[in-house]
């Protein structure tokens, strides 16, 4: 019998397993064979992630090999560069080689007593009076007092079988390539690029995450088939003039693309008797930015703190006891941080003509307006999410509206007005 079983060994699940294995008997399960290989990725960890990552990892140069110094909100017309140097703190975060980070989290959890079961797909979950039984596809079973679902966009059938909603999901495509550090430093004056172009997608960004000796790129889809997504990414990287300056000299192996869903829009209830749903599985991904790392880390950290006294008191993990987690997530993420993402999603996505005009105006404003840049910087650096200042978002929205041409103001005023109320 385990105290806690975690399904899903992504950043959320492994972070939770690492923190919880300090005081509980933990089982970590994933359908992928992470004992052999964890897929390579590069992710951006803004400074606001730091409170949720132990210094043991944050200061590890293998897991976080590069400083995050500059981001680029790019449009067709402007590079909206946000640099920590402008505001007195060069580092605005770290770049992680996510596979290395996960490997170290898993190893540390095992050192603390956690058990891992990789290459095992859980096919059935059975509730008992005093436990939950997990049955894998081979018929083997495990019993746990508490089940934590951190399965991202892959475990919806399991969570629906337990009575939970499934969040909305959208298909994206990602590709990683290796390149010399010298070439990457020569090509890129930023570590992260967020670029909107309705011809690429009306649902989300095209991005670059620049690591140490590797680069990660991709975009959110518009309901294309996997083959269509792959073909579009190939055309973008080979022909899209706005990005060619960054990728000269870099080769791409399109056989290595990863195509999969990413969730967003939080489910209404994330706990029940003996069950907690974490991170992307609960739709904890910001609506506009598709920022899932912070949300996953916050949910893992919050859940580990909620669970600790319950393990120590030999609790039965009732929904009433676990509901503290829902309340904390609302205060940390949904009541402030998510409101900006929701407003931006409503304002930018969906309509091709308005997306382009508003995004061009926004990036141009970042170029010329130091206060707007400062407010973005402050979000990146924020260490207490409960102090997220939604007034700054409203100020930026009002300033953005004032910069639009008159004809756009007339047609877009209702959208701006509604966005301000999120």
Image: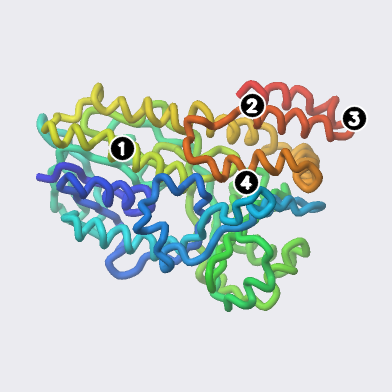
Number of other residues with Cα within 10 Å of mark 1, as a class: few under 14, some 14 to 19, many 20 or more: many
Number of other residues with Cα within 10 Å of mark 2, as a class: few under 14, some 14 to 19, many 20 or more: few
Q: Which residue is drawn at the image coordinates 54% and 61% (left, top)?
A: 67
Q: Which mark is residue 391?
A: 2
Q: Earlier in the sequence, mark 3 or mark 4?
A: 4
Q: Nearer the viewer, residue 125 or 189?
A: 189
Instruction: Identify the residue under disc 1.
Output: 303
Looking at the image, residue 263 sits to the left or right of residue 215; the answer is left
Figure colour scheme: rainbow
Tag 2 and tag 4, C-beta contact below 8 Å? no
Q: Which mark is residue 360?
A: none
Instruction: Identify the residue under disc 4.
Output: 204
Looking at the image, residue 210 sits to the left or right of residue 370; the answer is left
* Residue 171 visible somewhere in the drawing: yes
Tag 2 and tag 1, C-beta contact below 8 Å? no
**Residue 254: image x %, image y %?**
56, 70
* In this view, the mark in front (4 or 1): 1
Q: Which mark is residue 406?
A: 3
Q: Nearer the viewer, residue 254 or 421?
A: 421
**Residue 65: image x %, image y %?**
48, 66
How far apart marks 4 and 1 lie (CA) works out to 29 Å
Q: Earlier in the sequence, mark 3 or mark 2?
A: 2
How far apart marks 3 and 2 lie (CA) works out to 25 Å
Tag 3 and tag 2, C-beta contact below 8 Å? no
How far apart marks 1 and 3 lie (CA) works out to 48 Å
Q: Which residue is drawn at the image coordinates 72% and 50% (left, top)?
A: 197
Q: Earlier in the sequence, mark 2 or mark 4?
A: 4
**Residue 361: image x %, image y %?**
80, 41
Q: Classify 129 as above or below 368.
A: above
């Amino acid at each position: 019998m385990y105290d806690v079983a975690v399904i899903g060994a992504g950043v959320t699940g492994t972070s939770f397993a690492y923190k919880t294995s300090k005081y509980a008997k933990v089982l970590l399960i994933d359908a992928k064979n992470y004992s052999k290989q964890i897929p390579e990725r590069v992710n951006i960890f803004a400074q606001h992630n730091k409170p949720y990552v132990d210094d043991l990892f944050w200061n590890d140069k293998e897991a976080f090999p590069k400083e995050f110094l500059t981001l680029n909100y790019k449009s067709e017309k402007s590079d909206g560069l946000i640099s920590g140097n402008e505001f007195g703190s060069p580092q605005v975060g770290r770049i992680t080689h996510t596979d290395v980070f996960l490997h170290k989290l898993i190893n540390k959890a095992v050192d603390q007593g956690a058990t891992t079961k990789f290459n095992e797909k859980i096919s059935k979950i059975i509730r008992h009076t005093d436990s939950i039984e997990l049955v894998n596809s081979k018929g083997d079973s495990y019993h746990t007092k508490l089940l934590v679902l951190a399965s991202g966009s892959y475990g919806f059938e399991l969570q629906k079988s337990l009575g939970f909603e499934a969040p909305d999901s959208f298909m994206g495509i990602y590709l990683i390539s290796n390149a010399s550090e010298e070439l990457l430093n020569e090509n890129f004056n930023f570590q992260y690029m967020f670029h909107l172009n309705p011809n690429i997608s009306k649902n989300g960004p095209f991005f670059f995450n620049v690591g140490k000796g590797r680069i990660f790129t991709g975009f959110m889809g518009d309901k294309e088939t996997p083959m269509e997504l792959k073909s579009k990414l190939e055309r973008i990287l080979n022909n899209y003039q706005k990005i060619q300056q960054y990728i000269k000299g870099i080769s791409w192996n399109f056989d290595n693309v990863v195509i999969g869903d990413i969730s967003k829009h939080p489910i209404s209830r994330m706990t029940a008797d003996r069950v907690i749903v974490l991170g992307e599985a609960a739709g904890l991904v910001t609506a506009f930015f598709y920022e899932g790392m912070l949300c996953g880390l916050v949910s893992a950290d919050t859940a580990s703190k909620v669970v600790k006294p319950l393990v120590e008191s030999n609790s039965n993990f009732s929904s009433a006891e676990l509901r503290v987690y829902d309340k904390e997530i609302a205060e940390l993420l949904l009541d402030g941080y998510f409101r900006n993402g929701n407003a931006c999603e409503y304002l930018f996505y969906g309509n091709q003509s308005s997306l382009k005009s508003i995004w061009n105006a926004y990036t141009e404003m970042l170029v010329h307006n130091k206060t707007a840049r400062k407010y973005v910087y402050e979000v990146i650096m924020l260490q207490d999410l409960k102090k997220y200042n939604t007034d700054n978002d409203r100020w930026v929205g009002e300033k953005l509206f004032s910069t639009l041409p008159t004809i756009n103001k007339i047609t877009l005023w209702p959208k701006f007005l509604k966005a301000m109320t999120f």
